[in-house]
Image (tube, rainbow, N blue to C red):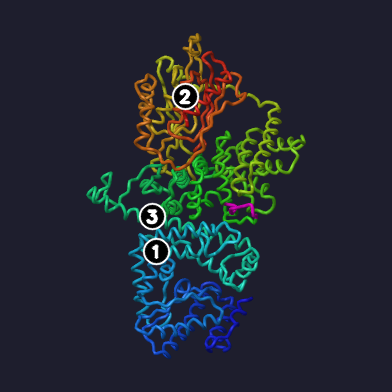
């Protein structure tokens, strides 16, 4: 039935309600709903005003005829807010002071309610005194929420004002108790109705991010304990209300569920291109509301915790905190350069300069995700628009290509598992994601009309990265896996085959964020073929040689195949329960096994030329051999100048690019324990290892005799490290050398020092990282056994690996260490004392020992 038909039905017993006269409420209502120019907030306000006038007339006549005073009519809920959709309920409270006869009040109520029912309008009604209203509100949270929006319609305005003032005072007094109840109510509703921003048939009111949540945020604001971030919130609420208006008019029903069959009609009613454009608008609004809710409820929790603990702390500590700070000044713990933790949130350090540090947003996001902490709203907004602070300019964009630190921080953020999602949402809410990755705009909030998919395109990409973070131990390049996961469906924002379009976009994005030509080609291939394995495994005959040959030709290398296998699983797991199963997984694994065999039969790659020793390395090696002790050199590295800095004067110290890392060269006479000693000293000085290389060189003319442990007196170990300070300044070279000398001669117990620091400052267990994986690379080398270690990067990781290898009485002939985001991917070429590869059994034992040491 149409809205017009509903308005014309069922004439009542009074002329005002009959709908038969030209000046009646029903006729005026019908004309208003047919005026398209009045759509949106003007129509909702006009409909509420029209309804006010009609109900006022009913109350005045009824009270006059009954000789009643001390009564008022109060609108609550949405009607109380002055916004009526075409089929909204009328939420009404008939308030009386208790002086009149109960039968007379009941008769007046009948003269109000029956005309409403006669028009076919839904009505939620009650009759109470102010004391009864307050008592009911104290017992029923939903009643109290409705009364917070109470608005006088007619009758005794003083009666309404007194009740409203008392209810608001009660709410503020009881807020510490009632707000947790309200949060629980919101969470139960979200579990029942789902998230509005991902549903194909969403409930505009009840789902998380819907209109009910906006009402809850209004209630929080009324408590004076916290307030929601207001930017964009009113526009989001207005958008959802506009969609509900169009839905009511399209269906003629009081419904809040945006069913699939009505979406095209609703989109046309709003002047939108199609149903996808409608859903995208709805999702954007829901995302804004949901994010505002997350921020607000976090603030409520912080305020309530502070209120609960402050009196006890004040009495115990005489008004000062544990650190001697006055109460209210929170301890700030460094997390990264320019980033600190304060009161359970990640905020910017006082010395942070967002206008001069374009990597800061990614660094802060990576630190927050790794620590399992939320990014504070003021911090995100300051990084998005630092010009809000006096004396600062607008945010400086990242140069293209990105500096290496920016790329590493992005990989670290993507590898943080489930904690990536809320941090990503915080960045996206302030427009930082599309600022970093402009191509993201086309997939943002884009619906997927496929029952298998649980998420919008953009959220699916982030969820795939979350799933991929648990598979990083299976691949040699976790950074490429994580970035490919983020980009694999990026082509869905463009017409045509999304894999083909995505390949082009992936090349552009990979180049933009600073990957070299080879890595860019791998990322493009992963995006192009991200459906190849699962589609081939489930749709082709794996016993047909042509099937295997075609996949091998498309993939090209075992490294790409390894990444594609992990990406396939992550993509399917992030899609939904129906997209992955043990059966599908076994088919894909069988295909990968067959393709690997084909690729292994191709000609071997050309052997890399022996690495040459530079003049500086040779000088250090000679000095180390002469002195019998370690010799080191430090070289600070800076990123290229940002755009506009080339013209800056040389005397402007602030304008010079800051060092982002140090190349540390160490030469040490070959001896037992070098690797754990050097790695331990670096960990003691809070230096993060980004990359490292260890190899043995033999000096010309040195004694060539070999000792019983396999070491040659003329051999020197050369270690090349790229390190960066976790925070603060870099240590002096002299201090590093002194500590290294003590570590090698046994006078410095590094393991004990690291354990003491860990006990004093335990790391926050924010991310549940996958367990480490240590394997023996098959046929990795004819001259040594290759032990591969893949683990979560952490202080002292290399020290623990080195100690485990030393304990197994093997020599580390060379090592290749790399840190990709939060993942360490290391290869150690080890031999027995005689200098040969380890027997298979011993190699497996060494791998187990290292894995146990990391576990």
The residue most toward the front is: 103
- Residue assigned mark 1: 221
Residue at horizontal 52 percent and vertical 51 percent from the top: 435
The image quarter containing residue 662 is: top left
User: Height in image: 633 above or below 716?
Assistant: below
Identify the secondary structure beneath mark 3. Answer: helix
Q: CA distance from mark 2 to mark 1?
A: 57 Å
Q: Which of the image's four quarters has the N terminus?
A: bottom right
Residue 490 in sight: yes
Residue at horizontal 47 percent and vertical 64 percent from the top: 214
User: Height in image: 138 above or below 624?
Assistant: below
- Residue assigned mark 3: 301
549 sits to left or right of 427: right
Q: Residue 784: percent from the left, percent from the top?
A: 57, 20
Q: CA distance from mark 2 to mark 3?
A: 45 Å
Q: How many C-alpha atoms fall within 10 Å of the one at disc 2: few (<14), some, or many (≥20)?
A: many
457 inside magenta stretch:
yes
| Range of magenta residues | 450-458
Q: Main secondary structure of the magenta part?
A: loop
Asked whether disc 2 touches disc 3, contact meaning CB atoms under 8 Å apart, the reply is no
Q: Pick whichever, 363 or 782, lies toward us.
A: 782
Q: CA distance from mark 3 to mark 1?
A: 14 Å
Residue at horizontal 44 percent and vertical 85 percent from the top: 108
Give the numbered dot on residue 804: 2
Q: Residue 5: percent from the left, percent from the top?
A: 62, 79
Identify the secondary structure beneath mark 1. Answer: helix
The image quarter containing residue 74 is: bottom left
Identify the secondary structure beneath mark 2. Answer: helix
Asked whether disc 2 touches disc 1, contact meaning CB atoms under 8 Å apart, the reply is no
């Amino acid at each position: 039935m149409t809205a017009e038909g509903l308005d014309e039905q069922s004439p009542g017993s009074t002329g005002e309600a009959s709908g038969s006269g030209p000046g009646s409420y029903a006729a005026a209502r019908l004309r208003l709903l047919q005026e398209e120019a009045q759509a949106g907030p003007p129509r909702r306000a006009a409909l509420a005003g029209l309804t006010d006038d009609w109900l006022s007339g009913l109350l005045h006549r009824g009270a006059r005829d009954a000789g009643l005073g001390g009564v008022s009519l109060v609108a609550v809920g949405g009607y109380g807010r002055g916004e009526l959709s075409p089929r909204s309920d009328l939420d009404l409270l008939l308030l009386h002071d208790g002086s009149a006869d109960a039968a007379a009040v009941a008769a007046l109520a009948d003269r109000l309610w029956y005309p409403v029912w006669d028009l076919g309008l839904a009505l939620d009604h009650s009759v109470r005194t102010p004391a009864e209203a307050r008592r009911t509100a104290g017992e029923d949270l939903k009643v109290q929420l409705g009364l917070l929006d109470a608005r006088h319609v007619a009758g005794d305005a003083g009666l309404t004002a007194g009740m409203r003032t008392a209810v608001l005072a009660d709410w503020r007094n009881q807020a510490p108790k009632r707000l947790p109840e309200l949060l629980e109510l919101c969470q139960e509703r979200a579990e029942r109705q789902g998230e509005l921003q991902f549903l194909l048939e969403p409930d505009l009111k009840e789902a998380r991010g819907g209109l009910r949540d906006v009402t809850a945020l209004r209630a929080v604001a009324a408590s004076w304990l916290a307030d929601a971030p207001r930017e964009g919130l009113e526009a989001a609420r207005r958008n959802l209300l506009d969609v509900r208006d169009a839905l009511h008019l399209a269906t003629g029903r009081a419904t809040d569920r945006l069913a699939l069959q009505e979406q095209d009609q609703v989109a046309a009613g709003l002047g939108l291109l199609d149903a996808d454009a409608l859903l995208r608008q709805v999702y954007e609004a829901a995302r804004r509301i949901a994010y505002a809710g997350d921020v607000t409820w976090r603030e409520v929790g912080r305020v309530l915790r502070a209120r609960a603990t402050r009196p006890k702390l004040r009495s115990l500590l005489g008004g000062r905190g544990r650190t001697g700070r006055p109460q209210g000044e929170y301890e700030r713990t460094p997390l990264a350069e320019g980033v600190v933790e304060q009161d359970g949130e990640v905020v910017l350090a006082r010395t942070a300069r967002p206008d001069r540090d374009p990597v800061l947003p990614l660094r802060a996001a990576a630190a927050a995700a790794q620590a399992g902490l939320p990014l504070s709203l003021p911090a995100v907004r300051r990084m998005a628009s630092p010009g809000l602070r006096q004396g600062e300019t607008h945010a400086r964009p990242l140069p293209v290509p990105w500096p290496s630190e920016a790329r590493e921080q992005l990989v670290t953020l993507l590898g943080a598992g489930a904690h990536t999602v809320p941090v990503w949402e915080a960045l996206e809410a302030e427009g930082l994601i599309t600022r970093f990755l402009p191509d993201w705009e086309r997939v943002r909030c884009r619906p997927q009309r496929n029952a298998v998919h649980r998420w919008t395109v953009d959220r699916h990409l982030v969820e795939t990265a979350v799933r991929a973070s648990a598979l990083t131990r299976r691949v040699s390049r976790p950074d490429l896996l994580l970035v490919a996961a983020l980009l694999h469906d990026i082509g869905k924002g463009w017409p045509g085959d999304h894999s083909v379009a995505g390949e082009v976009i992936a090349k552009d994005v990979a180049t933009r964020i600073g990957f070299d030509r080879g890595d860019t080609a791998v990322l493009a291939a992963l995006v192009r073929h991200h459906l190849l394995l699962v589609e081939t495994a489930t749709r082709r005959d794996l016993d047909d040689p042509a099937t295997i040959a075609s996949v091998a030709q498309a993939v090209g290398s075992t490294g790409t195949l390894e990444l594609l296998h992990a990406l396939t699983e992550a993509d399917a797991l992030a899609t939904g329960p129906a997209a992955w199963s043990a059966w599908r997984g076994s088919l894909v694994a069988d295909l990968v096994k067959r393709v690997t065999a084909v690729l292994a039969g191709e000609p071997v790659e050309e052997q890399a030329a022996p690495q040459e020793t530079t003049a500086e390395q040779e000088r250090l090696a000679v000095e180390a051999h002469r002195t019998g002790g370690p010799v080191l050199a430090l070289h600070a590295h800076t990123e290229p100048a940002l755009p506009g800095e080339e013209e800056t004067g040389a005397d402007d110290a602030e304008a010079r690019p800051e060092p982002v890392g140090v190349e540390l060269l160490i030469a040490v006479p070959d001896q037992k324990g070098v690797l754990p000693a050097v790695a331990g000293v670096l960990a003691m000085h809070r230096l993060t290892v980004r990359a490292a290389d260890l190899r043995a060189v033999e000096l010309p003319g040195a004694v060539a005799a070999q000792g019983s442990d396999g070491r040659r007196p003329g051999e020197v170990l050369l270690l090349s490290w790229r390190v960066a300070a976790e925070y603060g300044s870099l240590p002096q070279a002299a201090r590093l050398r002194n500590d290294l000398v003590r570590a090698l001669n046994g006078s410095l117990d590094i393991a004990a020092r690291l354990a003491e620091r860990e006990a004093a400052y335990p790391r926050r267990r924010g991310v549940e990282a996958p367990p480490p994986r240590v394997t023996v690379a098959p046929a990795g080398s004819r001259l040594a056994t290759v032990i591969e270690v893949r683990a979560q990067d952490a202080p002292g990781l290399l020290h623990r690996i080195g100690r485990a290898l030393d304990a197994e009485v093997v020599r580390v002939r060379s090592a290749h260490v790399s840190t990709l985001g939060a993942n360490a991917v290391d290869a150690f070429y080890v031999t027995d004392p005689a200098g040969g590869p380890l027997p298979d059994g011993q190699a497996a034992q060494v791998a187990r020992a290292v894995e146990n040491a990391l576990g």
